[in-house]
Image (cartoon, grey):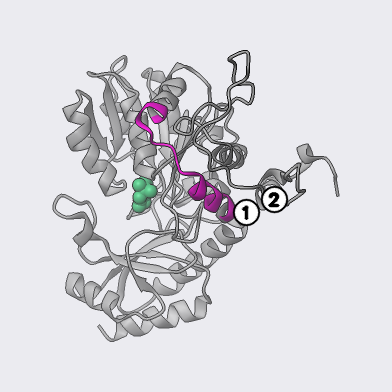
Amino acid sequence: MSSSRSSWSKRSLTAQAMGRVDPITKAVVPPIHVATTYIRDEDNAYSSGYVYGRPDNATIREAEEVLAMLEEAEAGALLFSSGMAAATAVFQALDPGDHIVASKVMYWALRSWLSTEAVRWGLSVDFVETDDLDALRAAVIPGRTKLVWAETPSNPLWTITDIAAVAEIAHAAGARLAVDSTTASPVHTRPLNLGADIVMHAATKVLNGHSDVVAGALAGAKADEFWAKVASIRKMQGAILGPFEAYLLMRGMRTLHVRAAAQAKSALDLAQRFSSHPKVARVLYPGLPQHPGHDIAARQMESGFGYMLSIQVTGGEAAAIRTAAKVGLWKRATSLGGVESLIEHRASIEGPGTPCPPDLLRLSTGIEDVEDLYSDLDEALRAS
Ligand code: PLP
């Protein structure tokens, strides 16, 4: 046992939100800083380092410190008011005319924003399967492609992108690599260590873990000009997270390691059992040896393969919708990563043009008893 903070593991540091104790009261939970403005010194300086609430806040900084530690991010972390606000800030830091290559299978709202809003602002976007390295090599335009955006495991098919290989291709073309690591979480994957320049999280999901905060996060490998531009966009557009939400996020993150490991264990158990279920045509989960990305996932993910899986049901779309209607313990709702398990017919949310098959049900595994989760869904599948 060590008393030096520098030797504590990530799990210990996260459980204690960096071990910070309030210096005045000795409280083990730091206070929430709600002030929007700060006293200026008599010599006109701001010696506290805080000026105004839109660019900065002490509670936000505390939560950012936890995330930067988890992601081993030299540039630090930036919290945003949502995952979408975090992701779009990265694209907004590009210049008109810049070319982007992004994963074809990715969070649908971001794909939609890229095909509409980003294009309106003069960015050009190509979508490729980023798990296909030859397709990616063919899509990048050396000197013009400025950003490769990869989501892994990718929502809702859970395809796996080889982060190290994609970083090499992006960098050789003069582009940065940003990775949406929402469904991996820093417990399972650290993209910056594998060569990514920026990692993004919808902190709304497993980082917070309790379905009561909408938040986004970026962590950066290098405090370069591009990172400064992203920080400036957050500041100027007022896209920072609120202090109450940052406090809740920090409270959620304290149990991240325990939740992520338990959720991944149950997800693997369910994936294995539903693989031989008579009403399930296919299970999509990178922890299964038959998953096309399994070998890469086994290399780049640790302590499990994440909490997300999908099943394709034998009776097609109608049977999938009927199954979702019949569950009790599983909650029929969008979103993912919380302690409560969620089920969703994804194609009907994503609409036309989705790569999501119509017979697919997306499952976000929570922390309930896995036997209860299995029986609930088993009964719903058999009754449909
Ligand atoms: N990335 C992924 C993988 C997501 O699943 C989501 C939301 O579901 C987002 C980004 C966007 O996050 P938010 O809803 O916090 O804006």
Asked if residue 221 shows in the view, the reply is: yes
**Under 8 Å from ligand 1: the CB of mark 1?**
no
Q: Residues within 10 Å of mark 2 (few under 14, many from 20)?
A: some
Q: Nearer the viewer, residue 179 or 89?
A: 89
Give the left or right position of residue 85, taking residue 259 as reference.
left
Relative horizontal placement of residue 56, taking residue 24 as reference (left or right): left
Find out whether the residues at labels 1 and 2 contact each other: C-beta distance under 8 Å. Answer: yes
Q: CA distance from mark 1 to mark 2?
A: 6 Å
Instruction: Report the magenta residues as a range.
Output: 234-251
242 in the magenta segment: yes
Residue 359 pos. (x, y %): 23, 67
Q: Secondary structure at mark 2?
A: loop
Q: Examine the rendering and report whether any part of residue 169 can be seen.
A: no
Taking the spot 19% from the left edge, 37% from the top edge, the residue there is: 115
Q: Can you identify the residue that label 1 sits on? A: 254
Q: Can you tell which mark lies on residue 16?
A: 2
Type of residue at label 2? Answer: Gln
Q: Nearer the viewer, residue 241 or 180?
A: 241
Choose the circle earlier in sequence order: 1 or 2: 2
Quadrant assignment, res 98:
top left
**x, y percentage for residue 232?**
42, 24
Q: Position of residue 67 (x, y in %)?
A: 57, 41
Amino acid marked by disc 1: Arg
Q: Residue at x 58, y 22 (%)?
A: 40
Check disc 1 and report its element: helix, strand or loop.
Answer: loop
